[in-house]
Image (cartoon, rainbow, N blue to C red):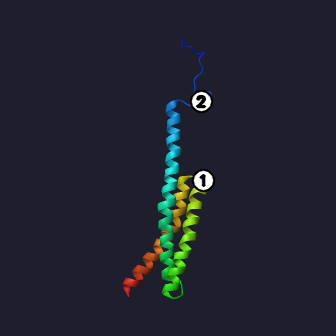
Protein backbone atom coordinates (compact mmCIF):
# COMPACT_ATOMS: atom_id res chain seq x y z
CA UNK A 1 0.00 0.00 0.00
CA UNK A 2 1.30 3.45 -0.89
CA UNK A 3 2.19 5.98 1.76
CA UNK A 4 -0.42 8.76 1.46
CA UNK A 5 0.62 10.72 4.55
CA UNK A 6 3.38 12.49 2.66
CA UNK A 7 2.09 15.51 0.66
CA UNK A 8 3.13 15.83 -2.95
CA UNK A 9 4.84 19.16 -3.67
CA UNK A 10 2.78 19.96 -6.81
CA UNK A 11 -0.58 19.65 -5.08
CA UNK A 12 0.26 22.29 -2.51
CA UNK A 13 1.52 25.00 -4.83
CA UNK A 14 5.19 24.23 -4.48
CA UNK A 15 7.04 23.61 -7.69
CA UNK A 16 9.79 21.11 -8.10
CA UNK A 17 13.29 22.23 -9.04
CA UNK A 18 12.82 21.34 -12.72
CA UNK A 19 9.61 23.36 -13.04
CA UNK A 20 11.14 26.32 -11.20
CA UNK A 21 14.15 26.23 -13.51
CA UNK A 22 11.89 25.97 -16.57
CA UNK A 23 9.76 28.88 -15.41
CA UNK A 24 12.84 31.01 -14.77
CA UNK A 25 14.26 30.13 -18.18
CA UNK A 26 10.96 31.03 -19.86
CA UNK A 27 10.89 34.45 -18.16
CA UNK A 28 14.49 35.13 -19.11
CA UNK A 29 13.83 34.20 -22.72
CA UNK A 30 10.80 36.49 -22.79
CA UNK A 31 12.88 39.38 -21.48
CA UNK A 32 15.67 38.61 -23.97
CA UNK A 33 13.10 38.55 -26.77
CA UNK A 34 11.77 41.93 -25.68
CA UNK A 35 15.27 43.40 -25.53
CA UNK A 36 15.99 42.08 -29.01
CA UNK A 37 12.68 43.49 -30.26
CA UNK A 38 13.38 46.86 -28.66
CA UNK A 39 16.90 47.20 -30.00
CA UNK A 40 16.71 45.52 -33.40
CA UNK A 41 13.04 45.85 -34.21
CA UNK A 42 12.84 49.43 -32.96
CA UNK A 43 15.86 50.38 -35.03
CA UNK A 44 14.48 48.72 -38.15
CA UNK A 45 11.08 50.36 -37.70
CA UNK A 46 12.52 53.82 -37.12
CA UNK A 47 14.91 53.49 -40.08
CA UNK A 48 12.05 52.42 -42.34
CA UNK A 49 9.90 55.31 -41.14
CA UNK A 50 12.73 57.80 -41.71
CA UNK A 51 13.29 56.48 -45.22
CA UNK A 52 9.62 56.55 -46.16
CA UNK A 53 9.21 60.05 -44.74
CA UNK A 54 12.27 61.28 -46.61
CA UNK A 55 10.81 59.94 -49.84
CA UNK A 56 7.17 60.92 -49.46
CA UNK A 57 7.09 64.23 -47.56
CA UNK A 58 6.08 67.07 -49.89
CA UNK A 59 9.05 69.32 -49.12
CA UNK A 60 12.56 69.62 -50.45
CA UNK A 61 14.70 66.47 -50.17
CA UNK A 62 16.92 67.96 -47.45
CA UNK A 63 13.99 69.07 -45.30
CA UNK A 64 12.26 65.73 -45.78
CA UNK A 65 15.41 63.84 -44.80
CA UNK A 66 15.91 65.97 -41.67
CA UNK A 67 12.25 65.61 -40.72
CA UNK A 68 12.43 61.85 -41.22
CA UNK A 69 15.56 61.57 -39.09
CA UNK A 70 14.06 63.66 -36.31
CA UNK A 71 10.87 61.63 -36.39
CA UNK A 72 12.89 58.42 -36.24
CA UNK A 73 14.11 59.29 -32.73
CA UNK A 74 10.53 59.66 -31.54
CA UNK A 75 9.49 56.45 -33.32
CA UNK A 76 12.40 54.52 -31.82
CA UNK A 77 11.54 55.72 -28.32
CA UNK A 78 7.90 54.84 -28.85
CA UNK A 79 8.86 51.39 -30.13
CA UNK A 80 10.97 50.70 -27.05
CA UNK A 81 8.16 51.83 -24.76
CA UNK A 82 5.69 49.69 -26.72
CA UNK A 83 7.87 46.59 -26.50
CA UNK A 84 8.09 46.73 -22.72
CA UNK A 85 4.47 47.77 -22.21
CA UNK A 86 2.95 44.98 -24.34
CA UNK A 87 1.32 42.07 -22.52
CA UNK A 88 3.60 39.47 -24.05
CA UNK A 89 6.72 39.28 -26.17
CA UNK A 90 4.62 38.00 -29.09
CA UNK A 91 2.40 41.07 -28.98
CA UNK A 92 5.48 43.27 -28.80
CA UNK A 93 6.90 41.68 -31.95
CA UNK A 94 3.52 41.87 -33.67
CA UNK A 95 3.23 45.55 -32.76
CA UNK A 96 6.56 46.19 -34.45
CA UNK A 97 5.96 43.95 -37.45
CA UNK A 98 2.59 45.41 -38.47
CA UNK A 99 3.79 48.99 -39.10
CA UNK A 100 7.08 47.61 -40.41
CA UNK A 101 5.28 45.64 -43.11
CA UNK A 102 3.19 48.69 -44.00
CA UNK A 103 6.25 50.95 -44.25
CA UNK A 104 8.18 48.29 -46.15
CA UNK A 105 5.33 48.00 -48.60
CA UNK A 106 5.33 51.75 -49.17
CA UNK A 107 9.08 51.67 -49.76
CA UNK A 108 8.78 48.75 -52.19
CA UNK A 109 6.00 50.54 -54.07
CA UNK A 110 8.20 53.59 -54.42
CA UNK A 111 11.16 51.52 -55.57
CA UNK A 112 9.00 49.60 -58.05
CA UNK A 113 7.41 52.81 -59.37
CA UNK A 114 10.87 54.38 -59.63
CA UNK A 115 12.26 51.49 -61.63
CA UNK A 116 9.23 51.43 -63.96
CA UNK A 117 9.80 55.01 -65.15
Point out which mark residue 21 bears: none
Rendering coords of residue 71 (x, y %): 56, 74
Which quadrant of the view contains residue 117?
A: bottom left
Q: Is residue 18 left or right of residue 81?
A: left
Q: Which residue is mark 2?
A: 14
Does the residue at mark 2 contact the one at mark 1 (Cβ under 8 Å)?
no
Rendering coords of residue 35 (x, y %): 51, 55
Q: Residue furthest top?
A: 1
**Which secondary structure, mark 1?**
loop
In the image, residue 4 sits, relative to residue 57, either above or below, namely above
**How many other residues sit within 10 Å of disc 1, few (<14), some (14-19) or many (≥20)?**
few
Q: Which residue is mark 1?
A: 87
Rendering coords of residue 73 (x, y %): 55, 70
In the image, residue 7 sits, relative to residue 88, either above or below, namely above
Between 27 and 91, the residue placed more toward the observer is 27
- Sequence order check, earlier mark of 2 and 1: 2
**How many other residues sit within 10 Å of disc 2, few (<14), some (14-19) or many (≥20)?**
few
Point 49% across, 85% down: residue: 62
Quadrant containing the N terminus in the rendered view: top right
**Which secondary structure, mark 2?**
loop
Q: Is residue 40 left or right of residue 77?
A: left
Which quadrant of the view contains residue 114?
A: bottom left
Between 39 and 55, the residue placed more toward the observer is 39
Between 86 and 40, the residue placed more toward the observer is 40
Task: Count numbered badges in the picture.
Answer: 2
Point 56% across, 64% down: residue: 79
Point 49% across, 51% down: residue: 32
Task: Give the alpha-carbon distance from disc 2 to disc 1, as whole Å.
Answer: 26 Å
Rendering coords of residue 49 (x, y %): 51, 73
Amino acid sequence: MADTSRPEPHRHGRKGPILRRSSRLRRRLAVASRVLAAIGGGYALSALAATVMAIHLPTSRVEAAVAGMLASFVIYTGAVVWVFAARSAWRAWLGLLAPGVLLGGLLLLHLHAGSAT
